[in-house]
Image (cartoon, rainbow, N blue to C red):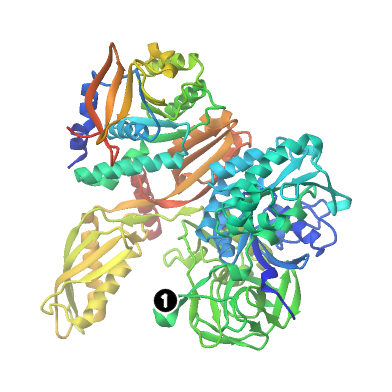
Amino acid sequence: MVKQDLIERSPVRNFEKSLGGGVKAGEIGVIASKKGLGKTSILVQLGIDKLLQGSTVVHVSFNQQADHVMTWYEDIFNELAKKKNLDKASDVKAELVRNRVVLNFNQDSVKTTQVIKTVKALAEGGSKTGAVIIDGFDFAKAIPESMDQMKSFAKEAGINIWYSANIEAAEKGLPASLKKFEKDLDIVLFLEPKSDCIQIKVLKEHDRNDYTTDLKLDVKTLLIAEK
Amino acid sequence: MAYDISKMRNIGISAHIDSGKTTLSERILFYCNKIHAIHEVRGKDGVGAVMDGMELERERGITIQSASTQVQWKDYTINVIDTPGHVDFTIEVERSLRVLDGAILVLCSVGGVQSQSITVDRQLKRYHVPRIAFINKCDRTGANPLKVRMQLREKLGLNAYMMQLPIGLEDKIEGVVDLIAMKAVYFEGEGGTEMRIAEIPAHLVADAKKYREELLDAASMFSDELAEAYLEGAETEDMINAAIRKGTLAEQFVPVFLGSAYKNKGIQCMLDGVTKFLPDPTEVKNIALDLDKNEEQVELTCDEKSNTVALGFKLEDGKYGQLTYVRIYQGMIKKGDELYNTRARKRFKVGRLVRMHSSEMQDITEGVPGDIVALFGIECASGDTFCGGGLNYAMSSMFVPNPVIDLSITPKDKKSSDQMAKALNRFTKEDPTFHCYVDPESNQTIIQGMGELHLEVYVERMKREYNCEVETGKPQVAYREALTQRADFNYTHKKQTGGSGQYARVAGFIEPISEKDYEFVDAIKGGSIPNEFIPSCDKGFKESLKKGALIGFPIVGVRATINDGQFHPVDSSDIAFQIAAIGGFREAYLKAKPAILEPIMKVSIEGPQEFQGNIFGLINQRRGIILSSTEDEAFTRVDAEVPLSEMFGFSTILRSSTQGKAEYSMEFAKYGKVPNAVAETLIKEYEAKRRAEQK
């Protein structure tokens, strides 16, 4: 299989279709769940999908060292390449790495404005950023303006942004830590463990709220399951 | 002489550049009463530190070569190996690590875990060297040992625990709180030699309790005895020490000491830590390869009755000839013994045997197992193994990276040219990452090494030690050429006009491979090329690989297969087939769409956060790829991959664009394809050069 097929037949296409087109330019999405259900895995899959399409992806991690993040990409890419029997996998990988930047911050000392400044500084010298992925951001600790700032940056630069959020059991509607940012969030997903898979539920998608999709994660690989 | 192996320590001091490693070594010598006055590295008195033997090091304020020296601390014998910190010299570091049993990882209390700390820590891990950490420079403004401890955990993944707390910081540092004895230790008197033990100051009692508890919880993991005693509140100092030692030896625990070498605080406690927690030579497993049994691994026993196995890990050119530093792994080395150099396959007699204290030495008659001694006048290269009693062992080969940079040198006068040969001969023996050869075309001497600074230092050493002045060319990146696809050839070499003729035809194909530099496959059926001429073809291909047609650099990653050919009963010869193979290769090479490869370096840059944009810019201008960036409070660390050819003069540019506040380190990562635009320029330059030479 060549790279183009990998993009077209990616489960991410179905993922986006089920979510009203997914997170578009200038929008913000959040994947929320308990620890260890596959938030980072989904983020990395979305990141790889963007990279395959030739966009530059900035992966911001607040809780993991840069090396670990790179290992995530490496593992998930290898898994995908193996599953789809990708041609010239190592060339494709080298190309992806070239367009990916991993940033590692400590949330206690680095504010959202600083993150935005860094992403802008990166874009100045190199190619335009297509997507920003933010893992391990603690919404409970975040100051109220932070999401407004991020949102206006996303709109201004025309990029899409995915966050992950740690939350405990799902309540009805948005969890408290996300509630205060509701107006800036376009999509909020929730991962729910089932006996044989991890189900992706939608808490908010543009104007729709609280519905279940047929999107699932494979429990073994934590990859988005194909239909 | 009676000796006790359990009271022997072979330790190294590893650190980021400028963490005060050499100063610390100095202080260790001082406290062990070996030297009577303390000199600073950049001494105002012009005496200079004792450990840095070479003048050049004094001038640059960095330590280039590791000198081994022996000291006595209480009833312990400690061999201290001072290791260089700059990354261009990592082969020196790695060589020293090979013979260490334990290490002190020195960190700056302000800079914390810096890019090089990560490199040296990785090296320590590779050689499984247990370590203790020493947070130095606690007298500096902004000192924060507890933050550094957290970085040890987060950045290096070490299970690090404070053994001490500071009493006062920055310019007010007076001493440390010992968390095991729960006492305060003050360092007083001239040179901090008088240790005063006192009660813990009231304002530190709560913190001390908290950190002691943390320490004991962690230490309990390694000893059930301690865990039980701790529950009952009956733990003893010995129990705690034993548990920490066990954890440290297993590389699962890192005790953290702190102080200031410059202000003479905390060194004695750290030395006690060395004796308490780092292993003696019998506690470290050492493996050798038995060359008689196809390199089978054998474990060495640190016992004086075993046959001798020793490793020559460092050469030095002294006034009286070549001095070889040797680590004895098992058995003894006695004056007059006969030993066998397993690499050179030569026997030699041990003449003079000495023990080194930096540049002073002491004659001895025997070396005991586990010890580090120096031999005089032994003809050998660094990394050679010496065996006694008919053994034929080699200590496992050390990891030696290939050189990535070339520099042409031309002696300025006749005298220099004689000396140059001598100097180069010595350097190549001393340093396996330093190569040299004479380019047959330009007739210039080319030296190769791991970086600009690496080669600069050797040029300086030639001048100082050998009085040999050379002119250097522009540093040249060691490019490679490689095939990108398979191509066939069918070439006939014929010269049959009068006299004895030459005739050979060779057919086959070449293709790219990634695992090896070169492979030759003989797929001839039916004897179309007689067996005697097959090696000639192989030789011809090898010859072709030395110089690619694109820019004249070696070709790598080639599999050459021959599957057909023809010979003449009279006119075919070895040389005819070599020429045919060369011709065949030339014919196929351009069809195989060759590409130029260049060395790509892994570069880490660290600096204040405000310069992040500049750092990104510098990398982007240099065809670099930013891999990641880590921000912590006011500091940013950027990791990137940048082609070596773009890194010349980088230190100056980095300094000027960050007001001298950022620093960088780099090491070889891989060979990568040169972008087309750059490749075209290189090819044009090469062609212009060739044309100029032909005129």
Q: Residue at x 44, y 80 (%)?
A: B291
Identify the image quadrant of residue B5. bottom right
Q: Is residue B142 above or below residue A155?
A: below
Quarter of the image for residue B574 reads: bottom left
- Residue A45 point in image, percent of width and height: 30, 34
Using the rendered image of the protein, determine whether residue A156 is visible from the camera's viewpoint: yes
Residue beneath label 1, please?
Answer: B295
Query: Which residue is at the far left?
Result: B526
Which element type, helix, strand or loop, lies under badge 1? loop
Q: Name the amino acid type tagged 1.
A: Glu
- Please state if B205 lies on the left or on the right of A4 as rendered: right
| Residue displayed at 48% across by 41% down | B639
Please state the total of marks drawn on the protein image: 1
When asked about the image quadrant of residue B571, the answer is: bottom left
Going by the picture, which residue comes out furthest to the right? B189
Which quadrant does the N terminus of chain B fall into? bottom right
Residue A39 position in % (x across, y down): 36, 31
Residue at screen point 24% across, 44% down: A81
Is residue B656 left or right of A66 when viewed as pictured?
A: right
Chain letter of the residue beneath label 1 in the structure image: B
Question: Can you say which quadrant of the picture contains the C terminus of chain B?
Answer: bottom left
Q: In x, y percent, where is residue B624? A: 43, 40
In-image side of B496 versus B306 (left or right)? left
Q: Residue furthest front?
A: B232
- A35 relative to B273, above or below: above
Q: Is residue B112 visible?
A: no
* Depicted B159 relative to depicted B102: above or below: above
- Of residue B675 and residue B89, the one placed in the foreground of this image is B89
> In the rendered view, would you say B295 is above or below A192?
below
Q: Viewed as shown, does residue B558 lie left or right of B349?
A: left
Coordinates of residue B619 in the picture (x, y in percent): 47, 37
Q: Residues within 10 Å of mark 1 (few under 14, many from 20)?
A: some
